[in-house]
């Protein structure tokens, strides 16, 4: 056990531990543990941190390889970078060193690594020097990836980054000379990666490698994902050498794309001349005419696009039975048509965040046959002012149109409620008393009435088919909901906290009214909600 003489403490700050190690209890009165306080104390085996401690400094327990247990108080709100780095005794059976939901290190066998659900952040240098790691999958509980998180992972080839990540530090993957060749992520995450690339001046490095022909795999992936951004940056410098390297990284360049580049490079004299020469050398007049004829036929619907051609416009995920889901968009068009079929594959839905922050889009037209629109699918599309939703759509997720022009336009709201086509999208928290949903409504979107605390009753008309995730979550004064027989989908309460997607979470006073034998009756009984036959 520790004694007072084992610590150097000044004004509530534990400056240094000078004891013999073993089991240590931080004395009462300590409010913070300074950086390096226990650094390299290999004889330390157990630490109990007192309730008054609110912060732990950088490297505080770094290198305490014998540390087997840490008791963390509820009030601890800040843990510095690499505070528990190389504390291998704290690793779980899979080799993860996790303290207060922060991943501080990994000492597992390597290979394909799946970071556990519940981890909220990855600490700096968490995977430093893990040469055996070949792929990493990051869960959607993680919100940030810091500097050098995967530094020195020389065998790392693939990383999957979820949309939950909103912050990426500089050089998270060490450098472009690694084997890393695939980053599985949405356009929003690629935007973050691009910002990191530019902000650390590593774009200059990538342009340099374009000139000398030694282009690492990950740079090629960035180029293919963000072609226009690379093109604009190179054209801005009127750098023909870099442009030649840029073109060498593109597997295939349609003649129509060359014409777009020529138009964009109007003020870059050298680049424009290079592009005109490139077009003359690589495309015959007949090829050019055939290309534009083919494109025109596809635009007016005479000729269908192949799956490969659709994949140049959308990111497409194929599910079971060859059903397709649109999960991303690569274009810059103001009007976007979401097809009901890509190649021979029916499109069943638009995935979560598929078009998130696509600020050029002004209108979305969804073809009949598409059934679902995922949460945040068009979130942040600031210019989006018109949406055509077909009769086939029967489920709409949460916050799909938040941050769009159609959401912000006051004229689109009817008494604090927003409808789009036959779908109730959102109600403002000010909505109070009893509310009758419009006749003809087919679905209630996810989060539609979330936190409408003044709402006491809701009547759903016949014809409503689905009640979305968290649709009435937090309606603490909601007493009665009248649900018709037409409703065949209500999300059940499962999981906990923000991972509970039930339609009626935190509605403590709710009674469901519905016909006998209806789906709503089955739902009420399965979820222990009082039920009255109507």
Image (cartoon, helix red, strand yellow):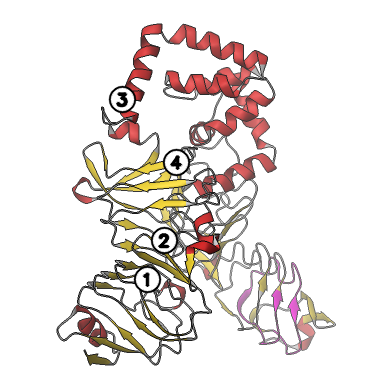
Residue wearing tag 1: 469
* Mark sitting earlier along the chain (4/2): 4
Give the quadrant of the C terminus: bottom left
Task: Report, in whole angstroms, how far the alpha carbon at label 3 lies from the one at label 4.
Answer: 18 Å
Q: Nearer the viewer, residue 423 or 149?
A: 423
* Mark sitting earlier along the chain (4/1): 4
* Mark sitting earlier along the chain (1/3): 3
In this picture, residue 300 sits left or right of residue 261: left
Residue wearing tag 2: 375
Vertical placement of residue 468 versus 312, above or below: below
Residue found at x 36% / y 82%: 458
In this picture, residue 318 sits left or right of residue 54: left
Residue wearing tag 3: 297
Q: Secondary structure at mark 4?
A: strand
* Mark sitting earlier along the chain (3/4): 3
In this picture, residue 248 sits left or right of residue 70: left
Q: Position of residue 397 (x, y in %)?
A: 38, 63
Could you tell me what secondary structure mostly forms the magenta stretch?
A: loop
* In this rendering, the label closer to the viewer, 1 or 3: 3
* In this rendering, the label closer to the viewer, 4 or 2: 4
Residue found at x 70% / y 82%: 53
Numbered mark located on residue 335 in the image: 4
Q: Position of residue 193 (x, y in %)?
A: 57, 45
* Mark sitting earlier along the chain (2/3): 3
Discs 1, 2 touching: Cβ within 8 Å: yes
Discs 4, 1 touching: Cβ within 8 Å: no
């Amino acid at each position: 056990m520790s004694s007072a003489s084992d610590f150097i403490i000044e004004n509530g700050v534990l400056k240094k531990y000078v004891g013999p190690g073993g089991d240590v209890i931080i004395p009462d009165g300590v409010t913070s543990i300074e950086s390096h306080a226990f650094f390299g104390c290999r004889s330390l085996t157990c630490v109990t941190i007192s309730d008054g401690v609110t912060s732990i400094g950088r490297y505080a327990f770094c290198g305490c390889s014998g540390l087997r247990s840490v008791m963390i108080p509820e009030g601890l709100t800040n843990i510095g970078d690499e505070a528990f780095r190389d504390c291998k005794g704290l690793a779980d059976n899979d080799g993860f060193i996790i303290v207060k939901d922060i991943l501080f290190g990994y000492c597992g066998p390597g290979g394909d690594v799946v970071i556990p659900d519940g981890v909220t952040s990855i600490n700096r240098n968490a995977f430093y020097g893990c040469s055996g790691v070949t792929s990493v999958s990051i869960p959607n509980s993680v919100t940030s990836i810091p500097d050098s998180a995967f530094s020195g992972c020389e065998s790392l080839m693939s990383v999957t980054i979820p949309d939950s990540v909103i912050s990426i530090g500089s050089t998270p993957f060490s450098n472009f000379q690694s084997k890393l060749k695939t980053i599985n992520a949405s356009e929003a995450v690629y935007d973050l990666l691009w910002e990191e690339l530019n902000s650390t001046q590593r774009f200059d490095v990538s342009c340099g490698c374009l000139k000398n022909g030694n282009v690492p795999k990950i740079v090629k992936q960035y180029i293919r994902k963000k072609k226009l951004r690379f093109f604009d940056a190179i054209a801005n410098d009127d750098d023909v050498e870099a442009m030649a390297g840029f073109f060498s990284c593109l597997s295939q360049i349609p003649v129509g794309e060359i014409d777009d580049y020529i138009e964009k490079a109007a003020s870059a004299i050298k680049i424009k001349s290079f592009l005109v020469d490139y077009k003359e050398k690589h495309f015959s007049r007949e090829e050019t005419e055939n290309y534009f004829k083919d494109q025109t036929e596809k635009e007016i619907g005479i000729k269908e696009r192949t799956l490969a051609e659709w994949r140049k416009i959308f990111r497409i995920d194929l599910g079971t039975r060859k059903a397709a889901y649109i999960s991303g968009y690569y274009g810059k068009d103001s009007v976007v048509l979401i097809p009901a079929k890509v190649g021979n594959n029916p499109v069943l839905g638009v995935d979560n965040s598929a078009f998130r922050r696509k600020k050029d889009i002004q209108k979305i037209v969804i073809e009949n046959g598409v059934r679902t629109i995922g949460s945040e699918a068009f979130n942040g599309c600031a210019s989006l002012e018109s949406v055509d939703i077909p009769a086939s759509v029967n489920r709409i997720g949460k916050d799909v149109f938040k941050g769009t022009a159609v959401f912000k336009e006051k004229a689109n709201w009817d008494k604090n409620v927003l409808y789009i086509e036959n779908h109730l999208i959102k109600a403002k928290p000010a909505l109070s008393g009893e509310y009758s949903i419009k006749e003809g409504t087919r679905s209630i979107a996810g989060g539609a009435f979330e936190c409408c605390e003044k709402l006491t009753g809701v009547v759903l008309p016949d014809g409503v088919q689905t009640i979305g995730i968290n649709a009435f979550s937090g309606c603490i004064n909601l007493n009665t909901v009248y649900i018709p027989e037409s409703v065949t989908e209500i999300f059940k309460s499962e999981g906990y906290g923000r991972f509970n997607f039930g339609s009626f979470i935190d509605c403590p006073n709710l009674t469901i009214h519905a016909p006998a034998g209806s789906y709503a009756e089955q739902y009420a009984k399965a979820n222990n909600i009082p039920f009255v036959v109507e």
